[in-house]
Structure formats: structure tokens, C-alpha cells
Image: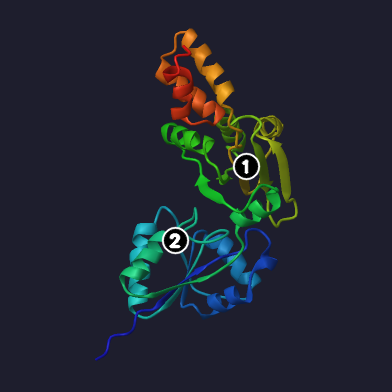
Amino acid sequence: MTADPPGKLILCGTPIGNMGDASPRLHAALRDADVVYAEDTRRSSYLLQTLGLNRPLRSYFAGNEAARSEEVAERLRSGETVALLTDAGMPSVSDPGLTAARAAHTVGATVTVVPGPSAVTAALAVSGLPSDRFVFEGFLPRKRSGRQALLEELAEEPRTIVLFAAPSRVAEELSELSAALGTHRPVAVVRELTKLHEEVWRGGLGMAVTEFSQRTSIKGEITIVIGPKPVVAADLSAAATTARKAIESGVKPSEAVREAAAAHNVSRRLLYQEVIAGGNV
């Protein structure tokens, strides 16, 4: 007796706010699925109702991913077609779904995708900031040590940065970003994309801290887009002056050269030759 062929897992991109963005392919995928797994069954029930569909619905969220991924694997082994939804956007991108994809690959099932709206690229498009190269970091780490380490990396990031933020934490996180990246770093705070009260706030990080700290109620999904680290024109003469002053104040020559080279965007080797090897100190 021949075993049933492995089934198919469909990762379904869903509207990030406006149900009018649901695609015909999304409708067809959900219609034809044997079962639909969803991060929030209530929100997904509304989506199914909007599309005029009634499919078996199972939860799939951070708290039960381990058990549910095994369940998905068993369904796929039996040849079923499984659709996976998250609250908004694409499963596995700052949302549950990676475990399901891995389980499907493990049992030899087909893994396919229905592309859909993305808060990442939509916010990037409306931000007015460089979009040819960008990095997506999801939500900032909740633990202070991990968050601080990432902020130090982002301060030197030469690409546009895209982050997600919870409404309850956006003011605090903008403050930390401003302290680490600089008050004048350009930012777009994009809220409620595709919805009735869509907002694109633009300015510097320092201005953003003032604006969002004063708001008594912040609601909706928030995406933060931050401009890349500005390129500072190299100025060897100014760097040498900075290094000399630091050395005269008691800073070790090697440390003074390192800091001045970074601040003025010059070669540490050339600066060392200018200040130290040249006998100017």
C-alpha cells in the first residue's frame, strides 16, 4: 500500500489593516485548505467571514508553537493542505510561523507562500527615507542588556533601519534611540498603515521623543523608519587637532587617535602618522 504523499503548507500574507487588501490568491488558498492555523483565531475568524469562507480554525501562537508544529507536521504527513495566518503581514516575520515551516520541510511537505501587504516595505515607501538598502530589526529586545547592545550597533548602521514598536513602549524606545543614534537622525513614525487614521510623522529623533511623550493615548500598529548614519566628510587636519587636544588633556595617544579617527571619518593609520609618527605631539 502506497503511503499518502506529504501535504502542503501555505504561509499566507494577510492585510495589515484594510481588508480590501486581501488578494484573490489569499481567498483561494484559504478556501482550498483543509485546516487554517492562526495566531489569533478571533481576528482570523473576522478575515474568513469577510472573505465569505468557513474553514476549520486552530490556534498557532508563541505559547503553543512547539505542540502545534508537531500537529501541523502530522497533518502534512497525511497529505493535508494547511494554511497559516498571523494577525497582520507575513507569518515568521516577527510573527509565529518559522516552526511550522521547519516542520513542513522536515516531513518533506511542499512549503509555499501567498504574498501580501507588508508593514515593513509600506512604511519604508512612505517614509521619504532612503530605501535602496535597509535592515529590518523587528521589535527591540525587552531585556536592557540586549537592547543596549543592539542600539550600539544601530548607531553605526549605514543602511535605513526599520523597527516595530508597541504603542505602550514607543515613547520610551524613541528616547533610547535618540540617545544612542543622535537627536538629529531623521525618523518616520508610521502608525495605523492602510487604516482610517493612518499617520506618517516625520522629523528628527529628538523631535519624535517630544511629540510622542506628550501624547496621552497612542494606539495602533507602529513602524519606525530611521535614516542611515550620516556620512561625515573626512578631515585629517581637524582630526589631528582633536587628537592633539585629547592627548594634551591626558588621554592615551592610541585612544585619542582611535576616537578622533572615528569622529572625523578618517583613516586611523593616516591620523597616527600625522599626529604621532610625525612628531607633532
Is residue 71 depicted above or below 237 in this figure? below
* Residue 5 as seen in the image, left or right of residue 146: left
- The answer to which quarter of the image holds residue 225 is top right
Residue furthest toward the top? 249
Neighbour class for label 2 at 10 Å: few (<14), some, many (≥20)?
many
Depicted 86 relative to depicted 126: above or below: below
Residue at image position (51%, 14%) is 244
Q: How is the image coloured?
A: rainbow
The secondary element bearing badge 2 is classed as loop
Residue located at (58% from left, 73% from top): 26
Instruction: Give the residue at mark 2.
Output: 97
The quadrant of the image that shows the N terminus is bottom left
Of residues 124 and 138, the one nearer the viewer is 124
Q: Label 2 sits on what residue type?
A: Gly
Q: What residue do we see at 48% from left, 31% from top? A: 267
What amino acid is labelled 1 in the image? Answer: Gly
Which residue: 31% across, 69% down?
106
Give coordinates of residue 18: x percent, y percent.
68, 61
Farthest residue to the left: give it: 1
Q: Position of residue 19 (x, y in %)?
A: 67, 65
The location of residue 108, given as percent across then percent down, is 33, 75
First-in-chain label (2 vs 1): 2
Between circles 2 and 1, the one closer to the viewer is 1
Tell me the CA gap for discs 2 and 1: 29 Å
**Residue linked to disc 1:** 227
Asked if the residue under mark 1 is in contact with the one under mark 2, i.e. CB atoms within 8 Å, the reply is: no
